Image (tube, rainbow, N blue to C red):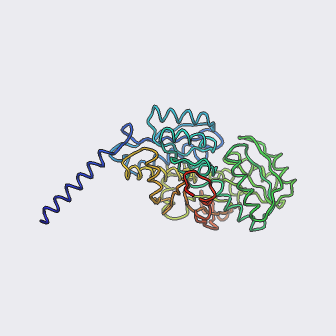
Amino acid sequence: MGAQRMAALGAAAMTSLLAFAAHAEISGGAVRFGVLNDQSGVYSDFGGAGSVLAAQMAVEDYGGTVLGKPVEVISGDHQNKPDLASSLARRWMDDEGVDAILELTTSAAALALQQIAEEKNRAMLVTSASSPALTGKSCAANTVHWGFDSYGLSSVAVKATVQEGGDSWFFITGDNAGSHAQEAQGIRFVQEGGGTVLGTVRHPLGTSDFSSYILQAQGSGAKVTGLANAGADTINAMKQAGEFAVAQNGQTVVPMLAFITDIDALGLQTAQGINLATAFYWDRIPETRAWSERFMERNHGRAPTMAQAGVYTLVTHYLKAVEATGSDAGDAVVAQMKKMPVNDPLWQDVKIREDGRSLNPIYLVQVKSPAESKGPWDYYRILATVPGDKAFRPLSEGECPLVKQ
């Protein structure tokens, strides 16, 4: 009787396995990722080719296949143009069988692609656009927004600065969707903390001369200049703030969005003492250090940014979801990604909320002085760790249509 029962159970298991294989739906005979980002412009330093490398490393570490099908990575430069990003994404999905679009860089590009991803039922895995609208009013079932947004970073950096006495602000803001979101969130947290905003000024993307904007900020009498921009714009603004002796004249500069590559470009002599918020630091724990050292060996010695690390994590988590569902359909895979906690060498036990927002911790860090730094890329001292459910916008405030109120 026992042998008969064992045989029956074995037959049932084989039937289930065959049924799963029969229903496994891998379109085009392969799982394909498309890394679509700025590879030549002002934001290429924190994403660019490094994000492509991170995706490739994730595929290699996963074994190069899923459900017996090959996994491939292609890449393209959208040049920070939403229309070009949309055109490339459509071609990839229609002609090249791309199942998931990664990184995106700018909020305008990411917002433009959400409807396309829904229409084509592909996943959109965002790691470097900053607008919280991606998981708010514009949220979509196929979108995951990983690592940071302007709400999460501002809630940590601005609150800490106001609490330390930086209660009057002037914002120098890039004239684009992501930077506008940074400014809006920054203003919100200044005012919620009892502070005041004495003025704002906006600059074009790729500005090289920030002197007039810095003079306006100094002239306002604000204690803090908030930089609501990113990439080369943040670097140039910070460098020129140093040339104008902003800190020596008693005004603090706080970047709303800064990457470790920005600090490297500035140099510790200029950047020392700056407080900022980040979703990732390569040297935080042994696991992040070990992965980052492998990345650095293949990335010309350059440490990974939070956007690049996020690409590795989302590729890995996506492949786990494909394996669990037997499909690479965008809606099925992203739904599964939300069901499973994220666990890899870079992040542990992180939930992806129903609106697509990852609830990873945000770290308040201070840039070390040259004397404190013990070697290349040893740039940050972690001052505080803020859990994701405290750093990011509450689900009830996002107005995401996917969320049942």
Residue at the image point whose x is 39% and y is 51% from the top: 62
- In the depicted view, which residue is nearer to us: 269 or 260? 260
Residue 299 visible from this viewpoint: no
User: The C terminus lies in which quarter of the figure?
Assistant: bottom right
Numbered label tally: 0
Reply above or below: 334 against 113. below
Tell me where residue 202 appears, x and y as whole percent. Answer: 77, 45
Q: Position of residue 116 (x, y in %)?
A: 54, 38
- Which of the two residues, 4 or 170, is positioned nearer the viewer here? 4
Q: Quadrant of the N terminus?
A: bottom left
Residue 266, horizontal then vertical, whole percent:
69, 52
Question: In this rendering, does residue 143 appear at all?
Answer: yes
Task: Using residue 82 as the reference point, say whether residue 342 is left or right of it.
Answer: left
Which residue is drawn at the image coordinates 64% and 63% (left, top)? 364
How far across and how far down the image is residue 143, in percent? 53, 48
Q: Is residue 29 left or right of residue 221?
A: left
Q: Is residue 222 left or right of residue 115?
A: right
Q: Is residue 401 left or right of residue 180?
A: left
